[in-house]
Image (tube, rainbow, N blue to C red):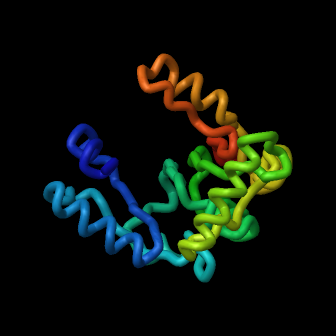
């Protein structure tokens, strides 16, 4: 929905929607039902386990010399940790200096306590039954160390509690964000 919500406010913003081919097809079908797709969006299919993001974007109109913003939400949980790191490394190698990445990631279950740990393990079992296993978890310090070696600067890494405080504060329905996932903001400093 970002494409439909924001493209009219930012008519020159080029949006590259990068996703697995099956997910991409379902997403395009739903978006077309909601309205006409703007000409500034380009859909780029990728299987993150088999191809680098730089290879996928090379097939598109993406301009490597211009700083870009990569919003990578709801994906890394389903990828092997090495695939997530390889994708970030690929971005670091081809994106322009100053490019930024925001991604969410699962906290290593061993880092969680009590109900959060049990709940996360239950969700992992459920998604496994649905043939969508949760494969990727990280210890925040290990992930920070890995991305810093790729020339990324960690701007912010919000815990579940910090996400709740910032985005769910004073909601009437008392919805809270889980501490099992975090939100990481990176900037490329080559």
Determine the residue positioned at 25% across, 63% down.
30
Q: Position of 108 compared to 87: left or right?
A: right
Residue nearer the viewer, 77 or 118: 118
Task: Inspect this view and state whether residue 86 appears.
Answer: no
In the rendered image, residue 155, in percent from the top left (x then y), is placed at 68, 35
Task: Inspect this view and state whether residue 143 appears.
Answer: yes
Residue nearer the viewer, 112 or 190: 112
In the rendered image, residue 154, in percent from the top left (x then y), is placed at 72, 40
In the rendered image, residue 89, in percent from the top left (x then y), is placed at 70, 63
Residue nearer the viewer, 90 or 165: 165
Q: Position of 62 compared to 137: left or right?
A: left
Determine the residue positioned at 68% across, 38% down.
179
In the rendered image, residue 72, in percent from the top left (x then y), is placed at 53, 54
Q: Based on the displayed image, in which of its 4 quarters is residue 165 positioned?
A: top right
- Count of residue discs: 0
Determine the residue positioned at 59% across, 31% down.
163
Determine the residue positioned at 27% across, 57% down.
40
């Amino acid at each position: 929905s970002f494409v439909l919500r924001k493209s009219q406010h930012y008519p020159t913003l080029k949006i590259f929607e990068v996703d697995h081919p099956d997910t991409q097809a379902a997403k395009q079908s739903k978006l077309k039902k909601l309205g006409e797709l703007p000409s500034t969006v380009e859909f780029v299919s990728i299987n993150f386990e088999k191809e680098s993001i730089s290879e996928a974007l090379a097939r598109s109109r993406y301009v490597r010399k211009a700083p870009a913003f990569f919003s990578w939400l709801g994906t890394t949980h389903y990828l092997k940790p090495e695939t997530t790191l390889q994708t970030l490394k690929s971005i670091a190698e081809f994106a322009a200096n100053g490019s930024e990445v925001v991604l969410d990631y699962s906290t290593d279950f061993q880092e969680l306590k009590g109900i959060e740990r049990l709940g996360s393990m239950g969700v992992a079992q459920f998604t496994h039954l649905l043939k969508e296993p949760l494969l990727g978890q990280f210890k925040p310090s290990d992930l920070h160390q890995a991305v810093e070696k790729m020339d990324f600067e960690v701007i912010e890494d919000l815990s579940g509690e910090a996400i709740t405080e910032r985005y769910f504060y004073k909601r009437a329905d008392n919805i809270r964000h889980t501490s099992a996932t975090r939100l990481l903001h990176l900037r490329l400093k080559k």
